[in-house]
Amino acid sequence: MIRQQQTLVLSPYAALYDIVVPKDNMLRQINELVDVTFIYEELEAKYSLDNGRNAIDPNSHV
């Protein structure tokens, strides 16, 4: 089963994102509006729990 990521830390400099990218930036607004959590449900059946390694969200921090 794919464990869902709770937080994503891209860089220790991620705080610069808030300084450099304006609050009204179109890509920032899209990021806040689009919910892609449905992807986990869509792909859950594609991963085997008993064959090979378990699927782990590569962005999760275990």
Image (cartoon, rainbow, N blue to C red):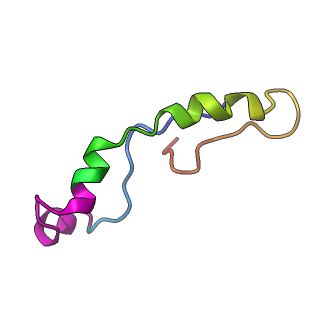
Residue 40 in the magenta stretch? The answer is no
| Image-based side of 53 in relation to 21, left or right | right
Residue drawn 28% across the image and 42% down it: 33
| Image-based side of 37 in relation to 44, left or right | left
Name the spot of residue 28 as percent of width and height, x first: 23, 57
Magenta highlight range: 14-28
Residue 24 sits above or below residue 34 on the image: below
Q: Nearer the viewer, residue 32 or 4?
A: 32
Q: Quadrant of residue 27?
A: bottom left
User: Most extreme residue toward the bottom, as rendered?
Assistant: 20
User: Most extreme residue toward the right, as rendered?
Assistant: 51
Q: Quadrant of residue 15?
A: bottom left
Name the spot of residue 35 as percent of width and height, x first: 38, 38
Q: How many marks?
A: 0
Name the spot of residue 14 as percent of width and height, x first: 26, 63
Residue 39 sits above or below residue 23 on the image: above
Residue drawn 41% across the image and 37% down it: 6
Residue 8 sits above or below residue 39 on the image: below
Residue 23 in the magenta stretch? The answer is yes
Residue drawn 88% across the image and 33% down it: 51
Q: Nearer the viewer, residue 51 or 12?
A: 51
- Our reading of the magenta stretch's main secondary structure is helix
Residue drawn 47% across the image and 39% down it: 5
Image quarter of the N terminus:
top right
